[in-house]
Every structure is written in C-alpha cells, then in structure tokens.
Amino acid sequence: MGFFDKLKEGLRKTKNTITERIDKVLVSFGKIDEELFEELEEILITSDVGIDTSMKIIENLKTRVKETRTTDPAKVKELLKEELAKILSQGESELKLDTTPSVILVVGVNGVGKTTSIGKIANLLKSKGKKVILAAGDTFRAAAIDQLEIWANRVGVELIKQAEGSDPAAVIYDAVQAVKARKADVLICDTAGRLHTKKNLMEELKKVFRIIDRELPGVSREVLLVLDATTGQNAISQAKTFSEVTDVTGIVLTKLDGTAKGGIIIAVASELNIPVKLIGVGEQIDDLQRFDAREFAEALFS
C-alpha cells in the first residue's frame, strides 16, 4: 500500500465524521444559502476543527462562493477542500536539516507516542541515507530509556544514554560529542515528558539548548512537538503550553488512524501557526511520513 492509500485508510474514521456528513448536507440542499453554511460550520465544530477555525473557514468559503459565482451546492465541497488545504499549507512542512550535523529535539507529554515517533523519524532519515544518533534525554522515566533502546536497535542507529535519574543535559552533551566523533548527520534528542512543572521543564530545555549552541554553533535545529490526534482539543492546550516554554518549529501528529478527531490537524495549523511536519497513520515503522497539505485534503475528501 502506498502512503496515499495508507493516508486514505488512516483517515477513514475522520472521513466518517467530516466528509460523509458534508456530502449528506450538500445533497439535501437544493441551493446555497445561510442555512447550508450553518450546517457545514456545525459539522466542522463537532469534528474537533475548533470554533474559531470553523468560523474562519466558513467565512472564507462564503467569499469563495461569491467570487466563483457558485450556485450548485455539490460544487461547494471542492471549494471547501481548497480552503482546508490552504490552512494546512501554512509554514514549511519540510524538516529543516540544512547543516551537518543537524539537531532535532522532540518534546511532548508522556503517552502521546513521543518515543515511538523518535524511532520512526530515525528510520525515515536513515532510509534517506542519513547517519542518525539518538539521545535518551528523558532520564526521569526508566521505561523511556528502555523503549528508545528497543527502537534504536530496531532501526539500526546508535543510542547515547545514561542511568535513570541522570542529568538530561549531561546525556545531550555526551550525544553531541558522539555526533562529532562519528561524523553523524542528525542528532535526535528525547526530552522529559512532564508539564506539571513548567518552570523545571523550561530550565531543563534551556540547559540542553545552551549545550547545543556551545558545542554545535550554527547548526540547523528543529523542535518537534508530538501530539496525539485522539486527544482532540486537548492537543491544542498542550501545544499552547509547550509554545510558552520553548520555540516549537513543527508538529508531529500521531495516531491519526485511530481517531475520528482528525479535524484537530486543521485547528492545530490554524490556531497555533506552527506547521504540521509529520503525521502518523499506522503502527508500522514506515507509517510516519512528511505531511503534505494537498495530499491530506485530497485523501480526506476522496
């Protein structure tokens, strides 16, 4: 199965909550009027697209309908698809790894699929010929180190780790030295998945950034926030909190295949102004792929 087919299959539950309901509404209306727009807005809001984003989409849709002089309700679907693709296209979806080495820091609360995402990102980069090293910077959870080691072995990349409870910054320092010595292309760092003490998390991340700035000045740096699509609107509040703590450069949205709340991806792109860079649509090692807005909209409406 190609990735587009996987994407279509992975979005099946979301399609049931958004696209099929939109189709039913468009078929039942003989003309385009205010009531039709209200029905469409309600579908978007109840599909976790979010109130503000849904209202914005419908306002833009009304404008497009006027501009194109569309009178057939069936043709509204194509305009809506274009509108969603436009929102999802905000920002650069490519990972910015322009220097050798480059660094990816991965943040996110426990349970969202952070460790699994790191393993899959490593696999994606390795498949493109990159030499990757992982750093087990979430030292507060023994399971996180063990889980990352399993992924490192599975992908066939090196893992730099220390004992549980070690200083995360010390692990990152060791990993940076390993990257220099082995002439690796990309260092992917796991970080602590705790949010209850924002101040501690902020201090920890500052220490990590200081080490990277000092030891690898001028490197390309991505800070990827992993969000679980199944949590719906809760993902937005997590993203807002992490954005206060650090400069998040991209979103990794996991578990899209397991949810009817895939509309959250539209809310994330619109409300947070942070580009979605990678999406997960399955359990397999290669089921995390670069996000393509047009392809996503096409798969959702196909």
Image (cartoon, rainbow, N blue to C red):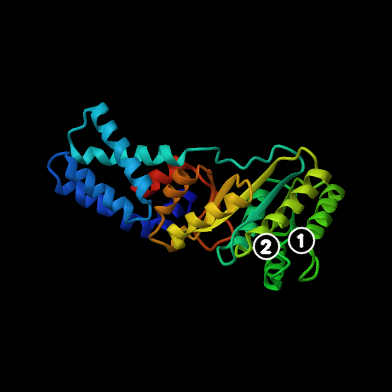
State the residue in front, 161 or 124: 161
Q: Nearer the viewer, residue 275 or 101?
A: 275
Q: Residue 64, how many percent across, how many down? A: 29, 31
Crowding near the residue tagged with mark 1, few <14, some 14–19, many ≥20 C-alpha atoms within 10 Å: many
Q: Is residue 34 left or right of residue 167?
A: left
Kind of residue indicated by mark 2: Ala
What whole-number distance in Å separates the C-alpha atoms at marks 2 and 1? 8 Å
Residue nearest the observer in this picture, 300 or 5: 300
Q: Residue at x 16, y 39 (%)?
A: 33
Residue at position x 72%, y 66% in the image = 149
Question: Residue at position x 80%, y 49% from top?
Answer: 211
- Which of marks 1 and 2 precedes in the sequence? 1
Label number found at residue 119: none
The residue tagged 1 is 168
The reply to whether residue 302 is in sight is no
Give yes or no for contact between labels 2 and 1 (Cβ–Cβ under 8 Å): yes
Q: Amino acid at mark 1?
A: Pro
| Residue identified by numbered label 2 | 192
For label 2, the crowd category at 10 Å Cα-Cα, with few meaning under 14, some 14 to 19 and many 20 or more, is many
| Above or below, 37 relative to 154 | above
Disc 2 secondary structure class = loop
Residue 213, how many percent across, how many down? 78, 44
User: Helix, strand, or loop for circle 1?
Assistant: helix
Quadrant in the picture for residue 99 = top right
On screen, residue 231 versus residue 149, left or right, reads left
Rendering coords of residue 194 (x, y %)? 63, 64
Name the residue at 55% across, 41% down.
Answer: 93
Q: Quadrant of residue 56?
A: top left
Residue 102 falls left or right of residue 87: right
Mark yes or no: residue 197 visible: yes
Q: Is residue 127 left or right of residue 74?
A: right
Which of the 4 quarters of the picture holds residue 117?
bottom right
